[in-house]
Amino acid sequence: MAQEIITYVILLTTFGYVVFRIYKTIEKLQSPKDKDSANKCGSCGTGCSLKDLPTKNPECPPGHQYS
């Protein structure tokens, strides 16, 4: 009985790890454009209203803030 429980725990852990790694791989394969569009600074340009905010947005990468 104890061996069955240990086996199920190992199988469940392995399955969870495989699903997690597949998710991370798919996340890395997304194009940078898709990631930037979800970010508040993704489309900032010269007419961006976000650059005029008095505080820096912690979600913006340093190169995108107030540029």
Image: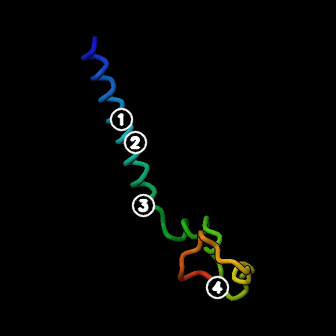
Q: Residues within 10 Å of mark 3 (few under 14, many from 20)?
A: few
Lateral position of residue 50 relative to residue 11, left or right: right
> Depth-wise, is mark 4 or mark 2 nearer the camera?
4
Drawn side of residue 7 relative to residue 17, left or right = left
User: Relative to residue 17, is residue 44 drawn left or right?
Assistant: right
Q: Are marks 1 and 2 in contact (CB under 8 Å)?
A: yes
Give the Cα separation between the discs numbered 4 and 3.
Answer: 27 Å
C-alpha separation, residue under disc 1 versus residue under disc 3: 20 Å
Image: 4 above or below 31: above
| Residue hosting label 1 | 15
User: Which residue is disc 3 drawn over?
Assistant: 28
Nearer the camera: disc 1 or disc 4:
4
Can you tell which quarter of the image residue 18 is in?
A: top left
Nearest to N terminus: mark 4 or mark 2:
2
Amino acid type for the residue under numbered disc 4: Tyr
Q: Mark 2 and mark 3: span between their CA atoms?
A: 14 Å
Q: Which mark is residue 19?
A: 2
Do residues under tags 4 and 2 come within 8 Å of each other at their CB atoms?
Answer: no
Note whether 30 is above or below 13 in the view shown.
Answer: below
Q: Quadrant of the C terminus?
A: bottom right
Q: Which element carries disc 4, helix, strand or loop?
A: loop
24 relative to 6, above or below: below
- Residue at far top of view: 1
The numbered mark, 2 or 3, whose residue comes first in the sequence reads: 2
Q: Amino acid at mark 1?
A: Phe
- The residue located at (53%, 83%) in the rendering is 63
The 10 Å Cα crowd at callout 4, few under 14, some 14 to 19, many 20 or more, is many
Quadrant where the N terminus is found in the figure: top left
Can you identify the residue that label 4 sits on? 66
- Circle 3: residue type: Lys
